[in-house]
Amino acid sequence: MSDQLPMVAIVGRPNVGKSTLLNRFVGRREAIVEEKPGVTRDRKEVAAEWQGRDFRLVDTGGWLPGGVGDSLDAKVSKQSERAMEEADVILLVVDATVGVTEEDARVGEVLRQVSAPVLVVVNKVDDANRESAIWEFMSLGLGEPMPVSALHGRAAGDLLDHVMELLPPEVETEPNRNDEGELEEIDEEGRRVFAVAIVGRPNVGKSTLFNRLIGEERAVVHDMPGTTRDTIDTVVETPSGPIRFVDTAGMRRRSRIDENTEYYSLVRALQAVDRSDVAVLVIDATEGVTAQDQRLTERIDAAGCPVVILLNKIELLDADDRAALTSEVERKLHFIGEAVVLKMSALTGKGVHRLVPVLADAIESYHTRIPTRKVNDVIRDAQIAQPAPHGARVMYALQGAADPPTFTLFSNRELPPTYLRYLERRLREAFSLGATPIKLRVRNRAD
Ligand code: GDP
Ligand code: GDP
């Protein structure tokens, strides 16, 4: 197992449920759970994964046997000691049915000195009635304890969500590859750089806008090879983090590659959209929403890419024309729902500054991680408001991954696509995901 993986150490006195918790986390049952207290076991290390993140779990096997009078050092087994030094996160497991023991208090004392974050896990909280038992463990001086039941799995997902937040940021040793196996840029926090496609018919002002964006942000700009030989992407540093503008070859230089025909510009735009997280659709305000704008929007929407509508050259319109254009957009592009519509003049720069914040919102949502409990609350409420047909039901849901937010729904049987779109909408609203793409994965019992 790679030593590079972050390590979560499970410590605590014997019989509190460390092994049971470890087995719960890795989802396997074959590991042996000792019934006898005080059994010194070898350090057990297993690989685990949560929210798409791999890590190591180490069960330290508890403390060396020894009387209460022994020195503190002697009470802590070498294994536990080493694990605590190496760990990125330490889970101190205690037993709700027993309360704070002297040994717990001593371990708590040791753990207050370590640098890694420590979570007090109050195990054997098998039902809500026992939850009040956790407050007693505040006396360990290690912050608010988290109740779980390792045996029944109660709140185990929430605990792991919390552990993931405490892990150090992921370090990529080699460039990420996306689903298509393409190389992707990673920012300093190890997150995938958000990709934006600026698309629209020829002459609507895409290049002017793009060059203005580079100028406005006084950006550190660098080129990246795109997928094919003649595509170049540009990564622009903005106050909200890096943004990768896809297929900017023709926008940076004034030389155009086959943009003269609408067909090629459409194909090219769709290829860019395929590699992007958000599409900025530029429309020439003086021409209004043309049939090709509509077609392009439909195609982007069908590709599952959220759209920001940008009405450019707005300075050429008077107030009446602007109002008329707004209603035209609503009428002709109604199918894209709650897309943000921005009016600006790339030529004069007026309104251009509003684009990056809109993209920044989308970026923030893109990296969102939502606690499992909240996801389940939303799904439950959505199902109460509108149950799925034929008794289909989501039993449990969680956000399995970020970048973009990916939700896994566990259902009793197949859910119809219309119902999934309904749930997606509810999730999007509840967590203000705006224009961010989100993915739903459904697992049903038959899988
Ligand atoms: P360890 O010595 O800390 O690794 O503890 P084990 O995992 O071996 O568990 C000790 C005992 O506590 C076993 O009998 C488990 O079945 C039991 N146990 C573990 N977790 C729970 C729990 O959440 N609820 C209850 N009621 N019993 C538990
Ligand atoms: P692209 O083909 O979509 O990249 O469009 P360009 O950026 O090359 O712009 C086409 C023409 O529209 C150029 O003559 C630009 O100067 C002009 N243009 C771009 N943005 C604006 C704007 O906001 N207002 C006006 N009046 N003209 C603009």
Image (cartoon, grey):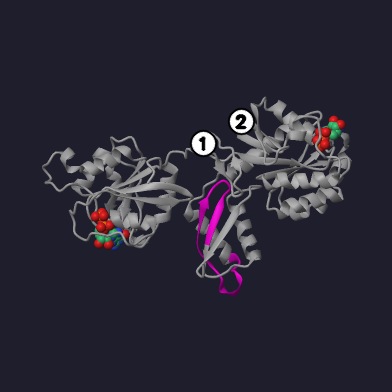
What amino acid type should be assigned to the residue bearing mark 1? Glu
Can residue 335 be seen?
yes
Looking at mark 2, is its residue's CB closer than 8 Å to ligand 2? Answer: no
Residue 339: % across, % down: 72, 48
Please indicate whether residue 79 sits to the left or right of residue 364 in the image.
left
Magenta stretch bounds: 385-409
**Eyeballing the image, is 238 above or below 164?**
above
Please indicate whether residue 94 sits to the left or right of residue 238 in the image.
left
Work out whether residue 41 or residue 194 is closer to the camera in this orientation and state it.
Answer: 41
Q: Secondary structure at mark 2?
A: loop
Work out whether residue 254 or residue 419 is closer to the camera in this orientation and state it.
Answer: 254
Label 2 packing within 10 angstroms: few (<14), some (14-19), many (20+) = few
Please indicate whether residue 324 sits to the left or right of residue 178 in the image.
right
Residue that mark 1 sits on: 189
Numbered disc in front, either 1 or 2: 1
Residue that mark 2 sits on: 239
